[in-house]
Image: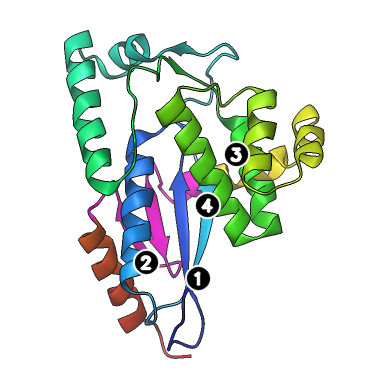
Amino acid sequence: MSASTSAAPLRIDFISDVSCPWCAIGLQSLQRAIEKVGGEIEVALHFQPFELNPQMAPDGEDAIEHLIGKYGISAEEAVRNGEAIRARGAQLGFVFDMGKRRRIYNTFDAHRLLYWAGQESEALQLALKQALLRAYFGEGRDVSSHDVLAELAEQAGLDGARAREILAGDRYAKEVRGREELQAVQGIRAVPSVILDGRLLVQGGQPPEVFEQALRHAVATRPAA
């Protein structure tokens, strides 16, 4: 993704969910950090699946009602939190339209497509991830809908017919479940969780400066080959 003086790219595993607002913020911050170290550190960015609501019904759930039930907060608190997220995103150039994000959806099929995209290339996986986040948080679209997912896959540069074929069956379901189980064993309980070089963990929607420092630290402390 950028030029580097290091022997091998710095692997970044970005563990996140499509319906996680702090994951959108964290990715935006991380990308700014990657741009800042461009020319010094080459990175290999990989997206790993995490489902905040794996038992979510196919038709989804009202977002405010979901937050009230899951976190025990009031509707007013949910709205205030949403406004704080919107403002934080705006600082980083990411648009949250909290009025359009009316429902929480099941994201498993989105993760299956992201896994497939990752098999194609890092660039295509990143493009699909960005398309999914924009569609959900900026446009309030149903990211569990196969029609929407296939459309977003095409927008990202992937084969729409192949996307529909994958969605129609259970392709990559085993792989996604396996990665989710591995992360649970590793103690990943919250997202975004960003693992650098397979050994350093940064959690939360941190500012770009924190991610930049972490990237430089990861390279500086790499074990000798």
Residues 79 and 53: in front is 79
What residue is shown at x 66% (from left), y 50% (from top)? 117
- 104 up-or-down from 216: above or below: above
What label does residue 34 carry, if any?
A: 2
Q: Which of marks 1 and 4 is nearer the N terminus?
A: 1
Amino acid under disc 2: Ile
Q: Earlier in the sequence, mark 2 or mark 1?
A: 1
Q: Is residue 18 visible?
A: no
* Residue 2: percent from left, percent from top: 46, 75
* Comparing labels 3 and 1, the label whose residue is closer to the camera: 1
Graded by Cα atoms within 10 Å as few (under 14), some (14 to 19) or many (20 or more), the crowding at tag 2 reads: many
Q: Is mark 1 on a helix, strand or loop?
A: loop
Left or right of residue 152, residue 207 in this image: left
What label does residue 191 carry, if any?
A: none
Identify the residue under disc 3: 111
Identify the residue under disc 1: 1
What residue is shown at x 37% (from left), y 66% (from top)? 34
* Comparing labels 1 and 4, the label whose residue is closer to the camera: 1
Is label 1 in contact with label 4 (beta carbons under 8 Å)? Answer: no
Q: Is mark 4 on a helix, strand or loop?
A: strand
Amino acid under disc 4: Phe
Q: Is residue 6 visible?
A: yes
